[in-house]
Image: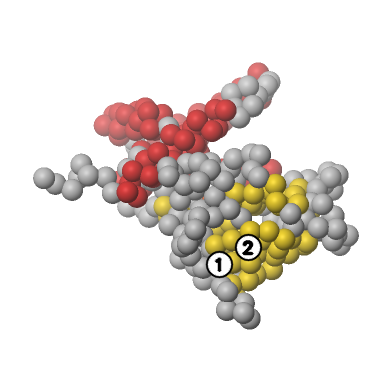
Amino acid sequence: MTQVDQPTEFDAKAADSGANATRVFQSKENAAGAQISQERVDEVATAAIKAIHEVIRDKQVTYEEYDALKAWMIQVGVDGEWPLFLDVWMEHVVEEVANAEREGSKGTIEGPYYVPDAPELPADCTLEMREDEAGTPLLFQGQVRALDGTPLAGAIVDIWHADDAGFYSQFAPGLPDWLFRARVTADDEGRYFINTMQPAPYQIPTDGSCGKLIAAAGWHAWRPAHIHLKVSAPDHQLITTQLYFEGGEYVETDIADAVKPELMLAPTPRADGSGNEVTYDFVLDPA
Ligand code: DHB
Ligand code: FE
């Protein structure tokens, strides 16, 4: 018997993540219903198709390669991996365009693993975790302010991240639904004190179509360890972002190209020996 047909626990979990991301996206209100004008569809679709024509000419793409692409695109849908594909290879440019004019904190991609309506927690809190949760404890603290420095009382810090094995709750099976997911309400000074565990780097599922593309191209399949956030306050623009760990693996070579120098954390050991702590403040643009 070969090992090939025996998925490891990791593979089995990873395989489910793509399909679950499709299911969650389809359940979102505006998934397929956005009203985009005929004029705009014509403008963008024509430009996109032309751009691909240019690649075909420039690279002299063959029928063999064209058929390989067709087969691969069909399989991306079968695997439920369109959200993964788009969020890894396209979203960072959409985000760049969307947030070009912002003066406050930098944003970056949302990725496919956000779930709305996470449990609400007070400013000083501990995210849901399992008994004997693996990893390095992290106190993630900071303040939400307006551009002029005014603290934003009652700001919401919606946080989600992977566990110490790189898995996201509600996407990889076997994890508690709200593991490392919460909507934290900042205190009267816009401050938050969130106790959690440092996440591990995340690997794009290797057994699906995105993994096959990565292997066929000889790329690596990793994103650096990161914490996802949506930070909001009344009368201010919500920012969707991620924070990374200075010196962490894959920070320089993120497959999703979503790392920015402004988004780095450098945790230090806590005085009482209980893991690390780090401070990161957010500045929100006016609505
Ligand atoms: C993907 C996963 C992430 O955790 C992320 O932040 C961005 C993209 C993905 O698998 O597409
Ligand atoms: Fe992520």
Residue contact between numbered discs 2 and 1, judged by CB atoms under 8 Å:
yes
Question: Given the image, on which type of amino acid does mark 2 rest?
Answer: Asn
Q: Residue 195 carries which label?
A: 2
Cα separation between marks 2 and 1: 7 Å
In the image, 79 versus 215, the foreground residue is 79
Residue at (73% x, 64% y) in the render: 142
Residue at (50% x, 30% y) in the render: 23
Image coordinates of residue 156 in percent, x first then y, are 75, 49
Image coordinates of residue 263 in percent, x first then y, are 63, 61
Image coordinates of residue 132 in percent, x first then y, are 47, 62
Residue at (82% x, 52% y) in the render: 154
Label 1 Cα crowd, 10 Å radius (few <14 / some 14-19 / many 20+): some
Image coordinates of residue 152 in percent, x first then y, are 84, 55
Could one spot residue 189 in this view of the protein?
A: yes
Q: What element carries label 1?
A: strand
Q: Earlier in the sequence, mark 2 or mark 1?
A: 1
Disc 1, ligand 2: is the CB inside 8 Å?
no
Q: Quick check: 162 above or below 173?
A: below
The single residue placed furthest to the left in the displayed view is: 1
- Image check: 231 left or right of 176? right
- Image check: 287 left or right of 79? right
- Image check: 170 left or right of 213? right
Q: Name the residue under label 1.
A: 137
Could one spot residue 283 in this view of the protein?
A: no
